[in-house]
Image (cartoon, rainbow, N blue to C red):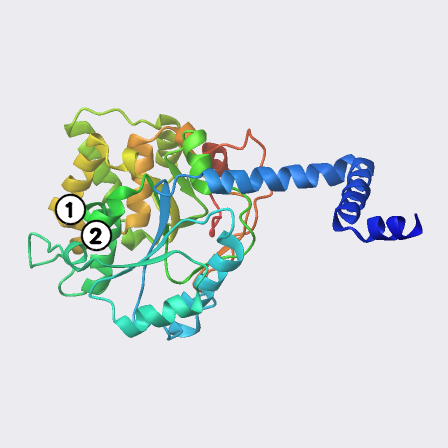
Amino acid sequence: LTHYMYTSLMNSNFWCCVFVFVFSTYTYSMTGADLSFFKSDKQRQAKIQSRNPALGAIMMMVMQPWTVIRNSRFCHFNTSMDSLVKYWLPWNDYPVILMLEKPWDEKDKHEILRLWPKLKIHFINVEPQFFIPPTTSTFEDAKYPLSGDDYKRMIAFTFHGFTHVPYLKRYRYLMRMDDDSCILNPIQFDIFQRMQQQNYTYAYKQIFRDPEWAVKGLNDFAEDYMNSHKLQWKNPQLRALVKSIKENLYSFSTNFEVLDMKAYRSKENMKFVHHMIESNKIYHRRWGDAPIRFLQIQMFYSNAEVLKICEFGYQHSIWAPSPICVNTSKEWTFFDHVKSQFGNPYMD
């Protein structure tokens, strides 16, 4: 009998049962908070696993050489990529598309993949779309250029050229990040799913004031377009607010934005995009994609379609950081945010 009891105690099945019994008793005695932790983590994992991989992606234009820190900027390519690993993942395990206006060097690709193996990095050459030429070679600012031609090409690409990149057409949402933009806090929600589920077509982090010389004539250009095409401003509340101030100096910080490409490729929006490109005003007057985007929102997007992202901090280049929003209530609409910022020299 003694021998039989000893053998049974040593049996692995017996100890397995004891372990299950003890663990079950412990789990049963846990607090509601502890159980909710496991439940929320399980829900998070389920959401991550069920996401549509073609729903969205980050697109980032990379300045070469990517290893160099330009002008002592707080945020540069390396810190930007580090911030994606630290704060973009795991909730937003979407592709990061690195774009170059020429073929990528294989050594650069290998080194970038080695440094940031957790990111789903794709390398594409956007040379044909980046170098879409203007329809004139003589510009209004020829005597005193407002910026270099490369910067104007960048504006034209982020406003129009990127819509022709074949690889980008597979994604419903595109989140633009410049290579000197950094996320400062964990993003604990799926950005693209929020856009889709709550019917947002544009999301932004910051608003700022452009200098008057950079938007000269832009407001009149938009007014003339709307009148000549007999169109109504889709965001009349915002339009009235903008017209009540002296100048249209306000812009989205397009160095971090999320675009619903289905909305952006709408017939009415693309007709305006082509009208702007054909006018060559980006090259004549250096009108940036940031103030133009602010006008597009007034023209073709309703107030309810625009999302001010609040839950994490962000910094671009040498700019002051954009913190987590103070007011994150559901009543805090896009229009409320814009109205609260008018009159400030620096807007967030």
Amino acid at circle 2:
Ala
Instruction: Judge from the rendering whether residue 303 lies leftward or rightward of residue 21; answer left or right.
Output: left
Amino acid at circle 1:
Ile
66 and 180: which one is in front?
Answer: 66
Q: Are marks 1 and 2 in contact (CB under 8 Å)?
A: yes
Placement of 149 over or under 260, stated as above or below: below
Would you say residue 282 is visible in this rendering? Answer: yes
Residue 15, horizontal then vertical, whole percent: 79, 49
What residue did someone put label 1 on? 277
Would you say residue 338 is visible in this rendering? Answer: no
174 and 277: which one is in front?
Answer: 174
Q: Secondary structure at mark 1?
A: helix
Residue at 11% in and 58% down? 139
What residue did someone put label 2 on? 156
Residue 187, horizontal then vertical, whole percent: 53, 48
Crowding at label 1, few (<14), some or many (≥20) Cα neighbours within 10 Å? some
